[in-house]
Image: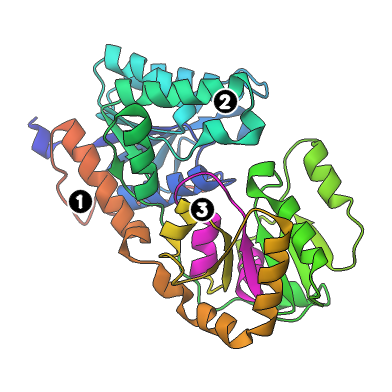
Amino acid sequence: MAKSKKKLKVAIMGAKGYPYVYGGYDTMVRELGERLVHKGVHVRVYNHRALFPQKPRYVNGIECIYTPAIESKYLTQLSHTFFSMIHACLSDVDVIFVVNSANGPFGMISRFFRKPTLINVDGLEWLRPKWRGFGSRYFFWASRMATRFYDQVINDSVEMERVYKELFNAQSKVIAYGANPVEDADPSYIEKWGISSQEYFLIVGRLIPDNNADIIIRGFLQSDSKRKLVIVGDVPYLDDYATLLKNIDDDRLLFLGYITDGNELAAWYSHCYAYFHGHEFGGTNPAMLKALGYGCAILALDTPFNQEMLQNGKHGWYFQKDAQSVKDITEAAESTPKRMDYFRSTARSGLVKKYNWDYVTEQYLEVFQDLAGFKVEAPSAEEGKVEKMLP
C-alpha cells in the first residue's frame, strides 16, 4: 500500500499517560492526542502502568499501552520512557514523539532502529534549584543529547529557541503550548470559603523554589493589602520548603493544596483580583496561559519567558525577584483598580494564534508528516466516528 494511503501512526511518550492529567505535559498529550485522532491519525500513548488501576486498550480513540517503570524518585520517569521507547521502536509506528529533555539520551535507541523521532524539550531544567548537583548536570547533558540524536527538537517559545541555539548550537522548531479560554466560571466554589469575587490575589503552581512562592508571600504580607492571598498547589511528597510556607501563620493566607476539579480551578482564576506568576525557568507556561484564558490581571516575575508571553507588558505588570518589589506591585495593584480592570478585559486577547490548540495540533501534524514521509488523507465519514471507551 502506498504511504499516501496509509494511516499515520504516532507514538507519544514521556508524560504520565492518557487520560491522566497532572501537569503540562499530560494536558498536552490529551489536547494534542484527541485532535490528532479526529484528523485521522492513529495515536498511541505510553502510560505509566502503576498509575492506572484500570487498563482499557482504547480511550476516546487513543491506543493506550501500559509500560512498567522502576518505581523510585529518580528512575520512574526515565525507566518508563526507556521501556516505552524499546516497545515503540519494535512496533509499526511511523513516528515517535517524546516529551521532556530528560529523555534526550533515548534518541540513541530510535536512531539505531531508524525510527523518525522528535522531542519537546520544555524549559531550563538544569537551572531549577531542585536539580542541584548531579541532577543539574544530567539535565544539561540530556538536553545536549536531545539535539544530537532526535530528528527534530521542539521548543515552545522563541526565547527557548534562542537558548538552544546559543548553548548547543542547535536549530529547533517553535511550537507553543495551547490554551482554552473560559468566559464564565461559577463563583460558588470560592464563596463557600467566605470569599467574594476580587477579594483575593492568587498563586497557582507547585510549591517549589523556582516558582518563588516564598518571595511572593513575604512581599504580600509586608504590603498593606486587606485582601487574601490564595495559594493553589503543593508538592506530592514531604518537603521542607513547602512545609515552611504552609506553616506561616497569617489570616490573609489561604493554602488550598491541589485542585483537580477544572470548574473549581476556573473559578479561583476567574474571580481573583490579580494573579501572581512567579515561575522563573521555562518557556510557555501552562499556568500563565490559564490566567490569560480566564481573564486575569497578571503580575509576573520579570523574566524573558514571561515578557514573551505577556507581549512585553501589554497584558500584565512585572515584579523583580525580591519581597520589596512584590510589596510595591501589590500596593500599586490595589491603588489602581481601573488598570486591573483593563488587564482583565484584554487578557484573552493575549492568547494569540500560536496558543490555540487547533493551530498547535496542525503544526505538530506537519512535523509528523514530514518525518514519516507522507501526508494524511482526511478521514472518511465512517472513519471519523470515534468510539469512546471510558476508562
Q: Nearer the viewer, residue 214 or 183?
A: 214
305 is higher (above) or lower (below) than 139: below
Residue 249: % across, % down: 92, 58
Q: CA distance from mark 1 to mark 3?
A: 43 Å
Q: Nearer the viewer, residue 208 or 81?
A: 208
**Residue 125 in view of the camera:** yes
- In the rendered view, does 352 fall on the left or right side of 193? left
Magenta range: 264-293
- Residue projecting furthest to the left: 2
Q: Nearer the viewer, residue 378 or 144?
A: 144
Residue 58: % across, % down: 44, 40
Label 3 amino acid?
A: Thr
Is there CB contact under 8 Å for labels 1 and 3?
no
Mark 3 surroundings: few (<14), some (14-19) or many (≥20) residues within 10 A: some
Mark 1 surroundings: few (<14), some (14-19) or many (≥20) residues within 10 A: some
Q: Which residue is mark 2?
A: 136
From the image, state whether disc 2 or disc 1 is nearer to you.
Answer: 2
Mark 2 surroundings: few (<14), some (14-19) or many (≥20) residues within 10 A: some
Question: Element type at marker 1?
Answer: loop
Quarter of the image that includes the C terminus: top right
Determine if the magenta segment contains residue 273.
Answer: yes
First in sequence: mark 2 vs mark 1 = 2
Residue drawn at point x = 56 percent, y = 34 percent: 127
Determine if the magenta segment contains residue 218.
Answer: no
Label 1 amino acid?
A: Pro
Label 2 amino acid?
A: Ser
Q: Which residue is mark 1?
A: 379
Residue drawn at point x = 40 percent, y = 65 percent: 311
From the image, state whether disc 1 or disc 3 is nearer to you.
Answer: 3
Mark number, residue 303: 3
